[in-house]
Structures are given as C-alpha cells and as structure tokens.
Amino acid sequence: MNPGPMNQTHYKYWPKRLPKSFAYPQTPLHDFLETTARRYPDHPGIIYYGRRISFSELWTECLCLAGALAGLGTTTGDRVALYMLINAAGFKVWSAEIESVLYRHPAVLEVCVIGVTDAERVEDVKALVVLKPKAIGKVTADDIIEWSKGQMSAYKHPRVIEIVESLPGTGTGCRR
C-alpha cells in the first residue's frame, strides 16, 4: 500500500470541495518576508500582547538570527530547531511575552528572557536585565522579581533575574 497523503485515513472525512494537496511556490519564505519588508516597512508584521513588530523590524530580526546561526557554524541546508517556549513546570511560557511585560518596568532598559534548567520545574524563567542609568545601584533583581509577580501569572514570572551591563550582540547590534 502506498503510504502517500492520498491514502491517509483522515481523508475519508476530508470535505469534497477542498483539494487534498496544493501547489505552493518554490520561493523561500525569507524572500517573501524581504519583499514585504521593502514594500511595507512600517506595517505591522506581528501584533502580540499589544507589541507591534513592523515588517522591517521582523526582517532585521531574521537577518540577526541568520548571522548568529552562521556565527555558530550553520550553513545553508542545515536544519535548526528554535525554541521560543520555556517549559516551566509543564506550562508553556513565551519568552517574548515575558520580555514585553518586563519592558514596562520603569527601571528596565533592555531585557532578554531565557529558560534555564531546573530539577523540579524542568525549566525556570530567567531574565537578563540591563537597567536604565538612573536605576543602577537603586533597583535590585529582587525588586524586579517582586514587581513581576504582580504583573503576570505565578508560573510565568522570572524566578531568576541577572542584572547585566549589556546584552550580548553581534557587531551590527543584533541581539541574541
């Protein structure tokens, strides 16, 4: 028996008016994004939890990611898995969501949220935070943790905050 898609059991429930396959363009996704970023640079490409990321910002982030991956030795054709979700005690936490909340703290200049291994919770939420100059020496990691508890669900707030002078980046200023 041919294991191809036409013989999959779910097709017996497939609506007759819909094709079981479709032709898709051979153009890579990044080409579509680049074209859209050039045509509509200020239009929102992503809106999530009130944060708007324009197509040009999204394209810049993609270039930063590509540069970072190249710096790690990946080449065209390599398969790469990217994890943006943190598994905190079985709950899925999106790092960008936590970052968008932490950016609302008046002392936070920059932030990067990551998952760190935890024996009990699988992963914990950790935030690397760059403070605004006027907050240096006045605001502590514990202050930000306590503030964050009132801003998000218990499983989402960072358990660990590390105050850093700057976030790592590339020569072009790309982060992560």
Image (spheres, helix red, strand yellow):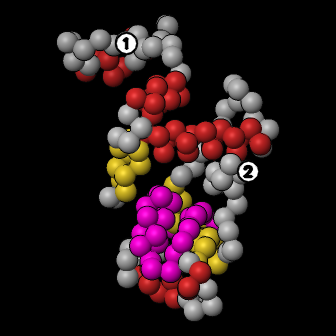
Q: Is residue 98 magenta?
A: yes
**Which numbered marker is on residue 52?**
none
As drawn, 122 above or below 38: below
Residue at which label 2 appears:
171
Residue drawn where x is 64% and y is 78% of the image: 163
Tell me residue 63's x, y (percent).
61, 39
Q: Is residue 107 magenta?
A: yes
As drawn, 34 above or below 111: above
Residue drawn where x is 69% and y is 56% of the image: 169
Tell me residue 68's x, y (percent).
70, 45
Q: Which residues are magenta?
A: 89-116
User: Disc 1 or disc 2, which is closer to the eye?
Assistant: 2
Which element carries disc 2, helix, strand or loop?
loop
Question: Based on the displayed image, in which of its 4 quarters is residue 43 positioned?
Answer: top left
Name the image quarter holding the C terminus: bottom right
For this rendering, which residue is in front, 8 or 29?
A: 29
Amino acid at circle 1: Ser
- Give the class, few, some or many, for how many residues have Cα within 10 Å of label 1's Cα (few <14, many ≥20): few
Residue drawn where x is 58% and y is 64% of the image: 112
For this rendering, which residue is in front, 27 or 108?
A: 108
The answer to whether the residue labelled 1 contacts the one labelled 2, judged by CB atoms less than 8 Å apart, is no
Question: Based on the displayed image, in which of its 4 quarters is residue 128 positioned?
Answer: bottom right
Residue at which label 1 appears:
21
- Residue, far right: 73
- Give the class, few, some or many, for how many residues have Cα within 10 Å of label 2's Cα (few <14, many ≥20): few
Left or right of 169, for residue 127: left
Q: First in sequence, mark 1 or 2: give its number.
A: 1
